Image (cartoon, rainbow, N blue to C red):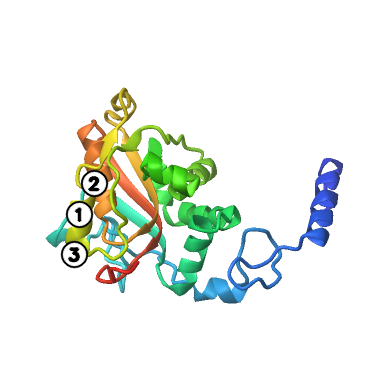
């Protein structure tokens, strides 16, 4: 079928851009057909977290245990949020994407991550009333120049057609970096560090909130955020991350 005439200028422009600036794999720099993407080989190296997974932790099951099934870990120590999903397991190949966005300001990596998160978290997105990123303290935001979780939340919201708010949840206390801390230390580090902004409770009361972060390690930060959101009246809190650390005993992440 012949393309509509109205699309021809767009196609010509894209062709010119691709000729001048060819699209490269975000991981290995091989040529790819679309911008903000991976080549087939690098895509296959990611450990995708497809269903079936624990509904509360998002950790993979060996076999399908039915809708809403919970893992033994979730039953033994329920988290502060209600449901969780992640796109991939955190390993070397996923880390390249995370670090490209977080430390190298490569927004094209974030665009790919957001697409993958929207796919993995479609059930959580379907029930979400508002999407909220894990916030940075204002001093760390000034140092880092942007909040990678807010970038992901914005683009996940755009893909899902959902509202997002970067101003509802605040990090009111500056905490030390979580890298190198074990689970108990991380929980102490972020306890009471988050608050809902003045007047923000009205936008949260009775709502299902989807919290967005780039990497979930022990879940300590997400639990502190969920506690603040629920204290302000949120009915449910979901958690959507790009990557999930399978072994949170590794404190160097």
Q: Nearer the viewer, mark 1 or mark 3?
A: 1
Kindly indicate whether the residue at mark 1 contacts the one at mark 2 (C-beta within 8 angstroms): yes
Residue beneath disc 3: 73
* Viewer can see residue 195: yes
In the displayed structure, 25 sits above or below 202; it is below
Residue tagged 2 = 224
Q: Within the image, what quadrant is residue 6 found in? A: top right
From the viewer's perspective, is 47 left or right of 115? left
Q: Are marks 3 and 2 in contact (CB under 8 Å)?
A: no
Q: Which residue is mark 1?
A: 187
What x and y, as percent, mark residue 165?
42, 34
Q: Nearer the viewer, residue 142 or 245?
A: 142
Q: Kindly identify the residue that appears in the image at 87 percent across and 43 percent down.
A: 5
Q: Name which of mark 1 and mark 3 comes first in the sequence.
A: 3
Disc on the earlier residue, 2 or 1: 1
Quadrant for the C terminus, please.
bottom left
Residue 235 as seen in the image, left or right of residue 117: left
Q: Secondary structure at mark 3?
A: helix
Closer-to-camera residue (211/253): 253
Is 246 placed above or below 119 here? Answer: below
Residue 141 on image: x %, y %:
43, 44
């Amino acid at each position: 079928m012949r393309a509509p005439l109205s699309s021809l200028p767009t196609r010509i422009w894209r062709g010119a851009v691709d000729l001048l600036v060819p699209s490269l794999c975000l991981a290995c720099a091989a040529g790819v057909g679309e911008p903000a993407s991976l080549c087939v080989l690098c895509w296959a190296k990611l450990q995708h977290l497809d269903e079936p997974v624990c509904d509360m932790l998002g950790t993979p099951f060996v076999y399908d245990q039915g809708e809403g099934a919970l893992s033994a870990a979730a039953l033994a120590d329920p988290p502060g949020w209600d449901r969780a999903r992640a796109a991939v397991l955190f390993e070397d190949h996923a880390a390249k994407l995370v670090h490209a966005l977080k430390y190298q300001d490569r927004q094209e990596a974030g665009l790919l991550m957001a697409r993958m998160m929207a796919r993995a978290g479609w059930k959580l997105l379907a029930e979400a009333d508002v999407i909220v990123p894990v916030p940075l303290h204002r001093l760390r935001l000034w140092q880092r120049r942007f909040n990678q979780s807010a970038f992901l939340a914005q683009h996940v919201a755009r893909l899902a057609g959902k509202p997002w708010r970067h101003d509802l949840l605040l990090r009111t206390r500056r905490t030390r970096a979580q890298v190198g801390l074990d689970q108990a230390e991380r929980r102490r580090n972020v306890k009471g560090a988050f608050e809902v902004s003045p007047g923000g409770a009205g936008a949260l009361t009775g709502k299902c909130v989807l919290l967005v972060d780039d990497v979930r390690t022990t879940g300590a930060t997400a639990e502190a955020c969920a506690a603040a959101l629920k204290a302000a009246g949120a009915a449910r809190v979901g958690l959507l991350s790009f990557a999930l650390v399978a072994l949170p005993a590794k404190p160097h992440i």
